[in-house]
Image (spheres, grey):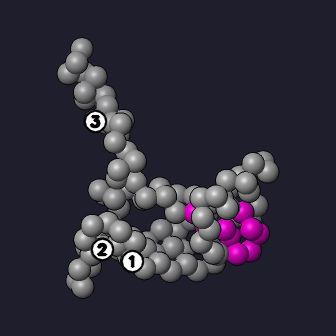
Amino acid sequence: MGFLDGMKSLFAGGGSEGAYSHWVYVRCGRCGEAIKTRIDLRNDLSQRDEGGYVVSKTLVGSERCFERVEVQLIFDEKHRVIGQEITGGDFVTAEEYEPSSDTR
């Protein structure tokens, strides 16, 4: 069963998902809902002509106003964030996100 377990972990993301994930936390500028999204550093990034990578995401909350929050992140060659832009909201930290998600 070792082979089947290996295949299952491959398609389920394995145990190393954290190494290939970057979490983004935002707050909607219209209603204040906190939203988080995961960026898969293996699949979501596009190469830039200037070097490095870029990803754009459109986030929509699920609780209040359904306003779109547009996020763009720029990464260097080592997948470190070197620039970020947001329209329709504000970036928040993971710590700022957590308390607001408990208000459900």
Instruction: Name the outermost residue toward the top.
Output: 1
User: What kind of residue is marked 1?
Assistant: Ile
Which segment is the magenta one? 25-33
Instruction: Give the quarter of the image for residue 35.
Output: bottom right
Disc with the residue nearer the chain's start (3 vs 2): 3
Q: Mark 1 and 2 residues: CB-CB less than 8 Å, in contact?
A: yes
Residue at 74 percent of width and 68 percent of height: 32
Q: Mark 1 and 3 residues: CB-CB less than 8 Å, in contact?
A: no
Disc with the residue nearer the chain's start (1 vs 3): 3
Q: Which of 88 and 76 is in front in this view?
A: 76
Mark 1 vs mark 2, CA separation in Å: 6 Å
User: What kind of residue is marked 3?
Assistant: Leu
Residue placed under numbered mark 2 in the picture: 76
Instruction: Give the quarter of the image for residue 74.
Output: bottom left
Disc with the residue nearer the chain's start (1 vs 2): 2
Residue placed under numbered mark 3 in the picture: 10
User: What kind of residue is marked 2?
Assistant: Asp
Within 10 Å of the Cα at label 2, are there few (<14), some (14-19), or many (20+) other Cα atoms?
Answer: some
